[in-house]
Image (cartoon, helix red, strand yellow):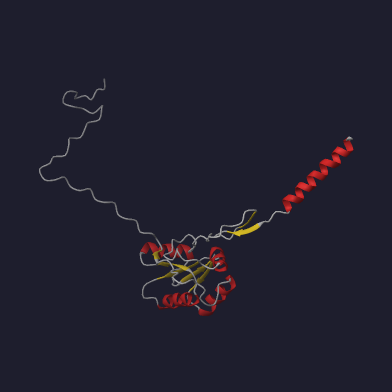
Amino acid sequence: MTPATARLFCSCALLLAAGAASAQSLYRNVDANGRVTYTDRPPAANAQPAPVGRSGSGTAGASAQLPFELRQIVQRYPVTLYTGDDCAPCTTGRQLLQTRGIPFDERTVKSSEDIAALERLSGRNGLPLLTIGSQQLKGYSDTEWSQYLDAAGYPKSVQLPAGYRNPPAQPLVAQQAAPAAQAPAPAGVQPPPATPAPDAPTPSNPAGIRF
């Protein structure tokens, strides 16, 4: 076999191997986060998609699944509603979101710390405040809120699965638990004497000289 014939034989062998590899069946898989992968292994017959609730919110409906398209919108343009007590526009805005089936988080503004945080966030202390992604909508307006929700791609009617629940409202500023007070010593029990520092004066070493 001449060198030229050997090279031609090797080239044909590589082409045949490539053709055999390309002839294998490929399977398209979409995971719970929407990532698409291809594999030559068929999916298991009993494979089920992972349950998904609100992204990163710890929602009470974590066992339910959002439709894929809605989950993608929530990840790109998360909705947060800022509300307060005795706020009729806040109630109306919440009802609008619930009527359309919008997954959203709610932050309540009650304490002085909440109010200060709201002012830093929006430049004012008026309620309600709605954020859709990075967009802030100050004050309630049915037309304006609906226009921005439409532009973000949210459905106009409920598409949430049965049993889905938005997470409960949380304070805008997380409350920290006060440190527990130290329990007093039982009556009749004397606390141990404090150990003096190595160089502190003692009856046997009034000058506090360190040896």
Residue 50 % position (x, y): 51, 60
The answer to whether residue 54 is left or right of residue 151 is left
Residue drawn at point x = 86 percent, y = 42 percent: 8
Q: Nearer the viewer, residue 17 or 29?
A: 17
Residue drawn at point x = 46 percent, y = 75 percent: 98
Q: Nearer the viewer, residue 92 or 203?
A: 92
Residue 108 % position (x, y): 40, 67
Residue 182 % position (x, y): 23, 48
The number of discs equals 0
Look at the image and tell me in which quarter the C terminus lies.
top left
Vertical comparison of 42 with 158: above or below:
above
The answer to whether residue 7 is left or right of residue 188 is right
Q: Nearer the viewer, residue 140 or 61?
A: 61
Q: Quadrant of residue 187?
A: top left
Vertical comparison of 160 with 197: above or below:
below
Outermost bottom residue: 143
Residue drawn at point x = 23 percent, y = 25 percent: 208
Outermost front residue: 1
The answer to whether residue 105 is left or right of residue 18 is left
Residue drawn at point x = 79 percent, y = 47 percent: 15
Residue 193 % position (x, y): 17, 35
Outermost left residue: 188
The answer to whether residue 102 is left or right of residue 12 is left
Q: Nearer the viewer, residue 200 or 160?
A: 160
Look at the image and tell me in which quarter the N terminus lies.
top right
